[in-house]
Amino acid sequence: MKNKSQKSLFAGNYGQNYLFPFILVTSLFFMWGFAHSLLDVLNKHFQNSLDLTKTESAAVQASAYGAYFLMALPAGFIAKKFGYKAGIIVGLILFALGAFWFVPAVEINTFWAFLLGLLILFCGLTCLETVANPYTTVLGPAETAATRINLAQTFNAIGWILGPLVGSILIFGNESDKSMLELLAEALDKVFLGANTAIQDITEIAKTQTDNSNLILPYVGLGGLVVLVLVLFLFTKLPEIKSDNSVNDGDTLSISRPLIRQRHFVLAVIAQFLYVAAQTGINSFFINYAVEINELQLNELQAGLLLGLGSMTLFAVGRFAGGMVMRRVKAESLLGLFAIINSLLMLFVIMNHNRFGIIALISCYLFMSIMFPSIFALGLRGLGDKTKTASSILVLTIVGGAIAPVLMGLIGENSMNLGFIIPLICFLYISFYGFVGSKTK
């Protein structure tokens, strides 16, 4: 029985096998995860290289996530008018252009030039996310839509791991004779064992680089990868599946109602806005929170390694395990439970700006892992031919990532732990959505 269930995960209504299209589209999840997580390194880097305050550096997220506000609805129109593949091609072209723009941006060497590159790049990501998220839900039976999108998002989480890791190494640099593993081991030792009493002057281990030319290699490398994937998509035929039963939970009457009257969808829009706000805010100021813990004396490189190999690894594990658990546990129940746990963890982070606070902050990534894809899949239930339009609106809510860092920067300018009250409020609402708001009427 188990094997039959696994085989049906990518089976169409007439026995089609959608495994290869799913694999190809899943590669997009990895790349945009990598691009997103590089922002968290840029935030701290520009504070150093351009002498910005926390509030000013939040413009990095405002520019990137503001692209979702500008591009989500046009991306939805492209997907609806010309199909899934056209939306992917447009997204990859903009993605590559934004990445390669970092070469002239380094020559210009002003904040607006970097923000322009991020705006273009994230307009591309808006197209990709508008198309790829709902596309995974139609590549198989409707009842396993949440499982498929969580599985695809597992590879997104792998990108989130490598982004801070590669970004920290290439952007912050390492002028010591110690390897990255040694630096990470020392950071973990300090956080979990309190070894700061045995290690003196650790802040000089890896001096922060303030040369913006360090940004060229990671972004040009990413742009090259995007071009390779673009070529692959150009020569691959993707099935253009009708979405009239894509995430239909049996409520055929709900298909005829306009989106504004779909209660579970409207509440999903709010939940997704707040989730992205919470995740982006936590990512943006993770490094600030870590380096401001006096007893640990972590530097930016070590904090970045903790973010990449600690927090994001838990994020990836949660995505993979969550997708499997959802085959036996309702997605809405797991979402509500995890949101409650994260609300408690945020409360602990606010009240304890110390070793235990950073442990709680790292732990919250495990429970954040299933939230975005779960809200997405729950919000698209029973929407039929409105799925593509609804998807573009849900992607539009990613603009929440432009707002939370600014608020957190203002609140936490003097003490970063206080800024985490914003994610706390977000997780409280998400728990409501999981247990109550996600039910279809």
Image (cartoon, helix red, strand yellow):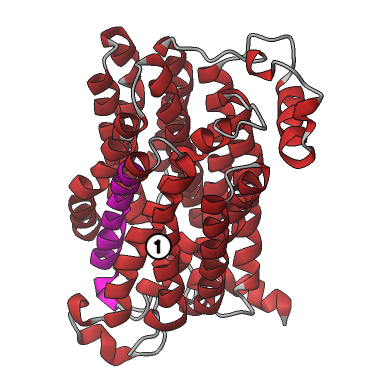
Is 151 rendered above or below residue 311?
A: below
Q: Is residue 343 left or right of residue 120?
A: right
Where is 385 relative to 59, above or below?
below
- Say which quadrant the C terminus sits in: bottom left
Residue plotted at (46% across, 13% down): 214
Give percent across and percent down for residue 355. Answer: 67, 42
On the image, numbered disc 1 is attached to which residue?
A: 425
The boundaries of the magenta stretch are 384-407
Residue at 73% over, 36% down: 188
Coordinates of residue 228 in the picture (x, y in percent)? 45, 31
Q: Nearer the viewer, residue 6 or 319?
A: 319
**Residue 345 percent location from the top left of the image:** 57, 59
Q: Amino acid at mark 1?
A: Ile
Q: Is residue 141 above or below residue 180?
A: below
Give the main secondary structure of the magenta stretch: helix
Query: In which image quadrant can residue 425 be found?
Result: bottom left
For the point 63% across and 18% down, the residue is 203
